Amino acid sequence: MSQRARSLGVHIGFGQPGKFNAITDVPGIRVGHVSVHRDLAHGRAVRTGVTVIEPRPGPARLAPCFAGVHVLNGNGDATGLEWIREAGLLTSPIAITNTHSVGTVRDTLIAAEHEALPDTGAVYWSMPVVLETFDGLLNDINGFHIQPQHVREALAAAQGGALAEGNVGGGSGMICHEFKGGSGTASRKLAAEDGSWTVGAIVQANHGRRASLQVAGYPVGRFLGYEQLPSPFATHALPHPGMGSIVVVLATDAPLLPHQCSRLAQRASIGVARTGGGTEDSSGDIFIALATGNHGLPASDYASKRAFTTPVAMVNNDHMSALFQAAAEAVEEAIVNALLAASSCTGHLGHRAEGLSEKRLLSALHQAGWRPSGQEANAPVPKERHTAHSPSQVQAEHG
């Protein structure tokens, strides 16, 4: 498995991760990745995929959970969010893919749900949640290579435990801070005095400029120049650096009500900002938080009348701060994990995104003043150094 921030001695924030440091540390959450990677004729290449997050075992419609949404910047697309805003309920898996495959993924989720549910004559509609980011630089996005079988394979592959990161699933063709990006995950387990709940995050990171990248509060982007690692956006014919998006799914086993889920989703913005993102007009930054702490919510269909009320629990506001901090830290670390896990990728029409190696990141961290815990402040800095250039300089050099 690829290096992750914590395995390099880079501890982000103050909280402790769960067993797998993944969204799957939240009980019941499962994730499935399917990657579609192949080379075609005339330089075309497929570097895309699908990621599915299941909130609970079994059809989500039969065991809904509360959820909320926050949009930091709306240059992105998603399905199923309006009903979450209105009713506060998540009644489907959440899928993440590329921008031009949202429709295929949505339709397949509806068909798969219909096949999985018993034929009871219940009347229901389905509005599954599908999020996207744009992989059209590395992927032949207009070839529409995501097919229904890929979505079904992702559903079948959903599992708990440790998760693959980087160039996998929906993150296959993504670019983050001008390095190869993709899928990343992390979690935080709250202390007993804070409720003992878990908050997990999974991101599809496809955003940001290199110079703005920060890791654990250190401005590493200033030391990760373009001399040896050109920007994927280095030619005049390509869009400007930073175009793309980031989508985040947060999950917790805390008993949150819908408005509290929206508040939790909003804190994903802090994790994105701490890594230097969230400031591009062309980035679609859409976040969803789900909470599985309330059980027994009515199934989402019109088959029968139910009781007038359902007992629910909620976390009191004076205990929300620890959850907010956990969400921010988990998102921040998930982005760094996505960068470290992603390997260099040559894709559509020869476009290439370089991976951020552990050695380069550690070198930049040392140059920015970071030291692992226990090291002397004047410890020697690794020899490898890089001269920073502006994107305009890069275009001139490589155009």
Image (tube, helix red, strand yellow):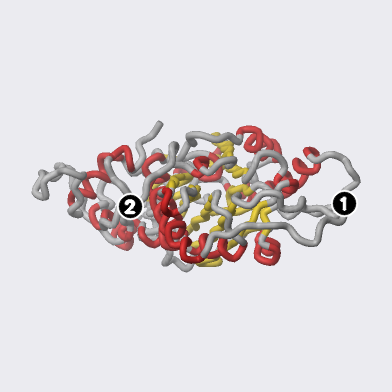
Residue 353 at least partly seen: no
Going by the image, does 214 lie left or right of 33? left
What residue appears at the point 58 percent right and 60 percent down from the top-left corner?
A: 314
- Crowding near pointer 1: few (<14 within 10 Å), some, many (20+)? few
Residue 45 is marked as: none
Q: Dot 2 corresponds to which residue?
A: 14
Q: Quick check: 299 above or below 45? A: below
**Can you say which quadrant of the picture contains the N terminus?**
top left
Sequence-earlier tag: 2 or 1 = 2
Going by the image, does 151 lie left or right of 75? right
Number of numbered labels in the structure image: 2
**Can you say which quadrant of the picture contains the C terminus?**
bottom left
Going by the image, does 225 lie left or right of 150? left
Q: Which of 396 and 392 is in front in this view?
A: 392
Q: Where is residue 65 in the image (x, y as percent from the top left)?
A: 65, 52
Q: Quick check: 270 above or below 295? A: below
Residue 258 at least partly seen: yes
Q: Which amino acid does label 1 sit on?
A: Ala
Asked which secondary structure carries label 2, the reply is loop
Q: Nearer the viewer, residue 158 or 142?
A: 158
Asked which secondary structure carries label 1, the reply is loop
Q: Dot 1 corresponds to which residue?
A: 303
Q: What residue type is labelled 2?
A: Phe
Q: Nearer the viewer, residue 295 or 160?
A: 295
For the residues labelled 2 and 1, say whether their Cβ atoms are less than 8 Å apart: no
